[in-house]
Image (tube, rainbow, N blue to C red):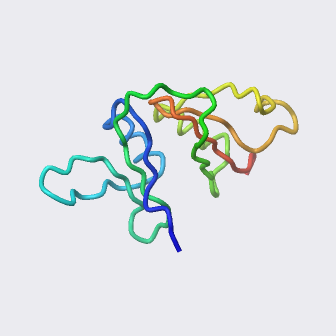
Amino acid sequence: MTTIGQISLGVTDDKRAGEFWRQALGYVRRPPRYDGDEWIVLEPPPGMSGSAIAMDVSESPLQEFPRVHLDLDAGDRDLDEEVDRLIRLGARRVDWRHYPAELEPGAPPYVVLADPEGNRFCVSGQRGH
């Protein structure tokens, strides 16, 4: 069966993007595979599951509504606290017209953000625990 080996994010500043995602996910940078290998690829640390994420330098324009995006799970952290942490790392909130405003009563338990490069991602979780 085929599996996902890694996810590549289009970025203009691979170092900035790599540092954001390293801190956001607690991942570690993959060691170079050969002399001159400067690709920034982040992997889950030993004992943690997940897919590797590569910072792929690109000049492609951002898509307002990307066809593919990452969904993060806040796990045992409060959703709003996790969103605040990601914003402190450099993420920003994205107005997403397809979902109700996150502060409305009964709003879904997820928030749409963009990384420092503008790549959209969602964070889901529980509030108030």
Q: Which residue is drawn at the image coordinates 61% and 39% (left, top)?
A: 67
* Residue 104 figure quarter: top right
- Give the answer, above or below, for where 51 lies relative to 53: below
- Give the answer, above or below, for where 72 lies relative to 103: below
Q: How many labels does the image show?
A: 0
Q: Position of residue 119 (x, y in %)?
A: 51, 34
Please give left or right for residue 105 compared with residue 122 in the image.
right
Give the residue at the far bottom of this rendering: 1
Please give left or right for residue 93 compared with residue 20 in the image.
right
* Residue 11 figure quarter: top left
Q: Where is residue 42 in the image (x, y as percent from the top left)?
A: 37, 53
Q: Position of residue 126 (x, y in %)?
A: 73, 50
Give the residue at the far left of this rendering: 35
Q: Which residue is drawn at the image coordinates 47% and 67% (left, top)?
A: 48
Q: Where is residue 81 in the image (x, y as percent from the top left)?
A: 62, 41
Q: Which residue is drawn at the image coordinates 27% and 47% (left, top)?
A: 39
Please give left or right for residue 61 compared with residue 101 in the image.
left
Q: Which residue is drawn at the image coordinates 42% and 51% (left, top)?
A: 53
* Residue 29 figure quarter: bottom left
Query: Between residues 106 and 55, which one lies in front from this camera angle?
Result: 55
Give the residue at the far right of this rendering: 106
